Amino acid sequence: MPRSPSSPAFWRSPLRGPWFTSVLGVVLLAGITVLFVTGLLSYAAYNPDLSPVNDQTPDKGLLGFYLFSWPTHPSWLYRLTQGVHVTLGIALIPVLLAKLWSVVPKLFALPPARSLAHALERLSLLLLVGGGLFEFTTGVLNVQLDYIFPGSFYPLHFYGAWVFFAAFLAHAVLKTPLALRNLRHIRDEQPSGGGKLVSPNPAEPTVSRRGALGVVGGGSLLLLATTAGRSFDGPLRETAVLAPHGGPEPGGGPGGFQINKTAAYAGISQTETGAEAWRLVVTGRDGRSVRLARPQLLQLALHSSALPIACVEGWSTSDQWWRGVRLRDLAALVGHDDPVDVFVESLQRHGAFRRAALRANQVADPRSLLALFVNGEDLTPDHGYPARVIVPAAPGVLNTKWVARMTFGDL
């Protein structure tokens, strides 16, 4: 028996073949394209070109060419795009692993490079495999809130996505025509252009290729069923057993919906949010500034908005009923009759996104509020009491809690 992985006879599984690999490749072609597009949309939703405060990848250069002011309509836009991104990414894991397994003989083929073109193809394959494993691994760890990798998730995942997708695109251009030809010949497992995927000495099959595809598809459906529920409310949310946000909501009553950071985690004490200590500082044109206690905010015109919260980890809530002061009315208090950008600072002293910037179009939306109430009651400490920002379609981290200062003006 061959002892070297570089020998075609070393790999004896009868499942490997051009058709099996092509089916998995076509699924990944569609799925990874959707993942890349929704990932770029998530990056745009953070408005990293708005202000250095929001920019988690300051050296992106030309990679930020597509950035634009994230819209506020429809209000569930980010809930949809990020829910699809995370749920689809997890569901594709069995397909990705099966695809890598199906082509593993090619990774050990000798000689490493028969020509310059072949060397470039092998390099793109290395970037494709390494980039795919890196992107899916960091994505899953982020969903689970396990930041065991060095550095910040945002630049690692962002740059990794561009490297991976560039290799993926090059591979797709080279291999898609061959994959489509293989799919037309379901029963033909001879490697017509398929390389050394078919073993010259296959072992006895224990399952058919269609059965193997059924196992892969079943695994994807299982992951879908145990992940997708966190984008919904009610009984479906209980099915998200693989997600850290799939269990019971924090408490009951008006504030009984999902959160990421608690007041205790953020180091927010009742002393600094109490009526005697807390004041909202609003600054605007020509340095004009006002200080408002919560009773003074309650004397301003209050408005209500039904808006969800959606997070980069893929979870979201249904519409909650928020009530508070419109952001554009606060801008008018300090001399900005036309809505402008705003820089929001929290009482939170440490951690990412304790400060955030919002675009003028987000301030202008009449549903954008400095919320004081949710679902008919005062905000709970964990939901940002005494005041928090809520903006339609914005990622959850930009809906700053425990707001202490708001600075209006062009950023």
Image (tube, rainbow, N blue to C red):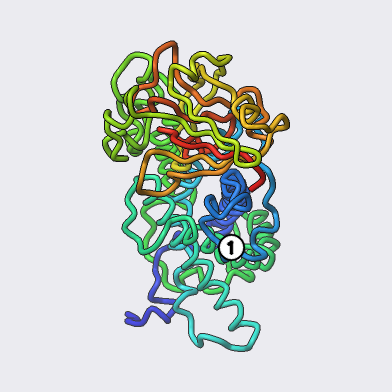
Q: Label 1 belongs to which residue?
A: 162
Question: Does the image show residue 30?
Answer: no
Query: Toward the viewer: 200 or 159?
Result: 159
Check disc 1 and give the amino acid type: Trp
Image coords of residue 301 (percent x, y): 58, 14
Q: Position of residue 189 (x, y in %)?
A: 56, 62
- Quadrant in the picture for residue 77: top right
Taking 100 as reference, is 78 left or right? Answer: right
Q: Secondary structure at mark 1?
A: helix
- What is the crowding at mark 1: few (fewer than 14 residues within 10 Å), some, or many (at least 20)? some
Residue 126 visible to an observer of this rendering:
yes
**Is 134 above or below relative to 108?**
above
Horizontal side of 354 relative to 357 (left or right) equals left
Q: Nearer the viewer, residue 168 or 404?
A: 404
Q: Residue at x 31, y 32 (%)?
A: 272
Q: Is residue 121 above or below residue 232?
A: below
Residue at x-position 55% and y-position 86%:
113
The residue positioned 32% from the left and 81% from the top of the image is: 3
Q: Residue furthest top?
A: 376
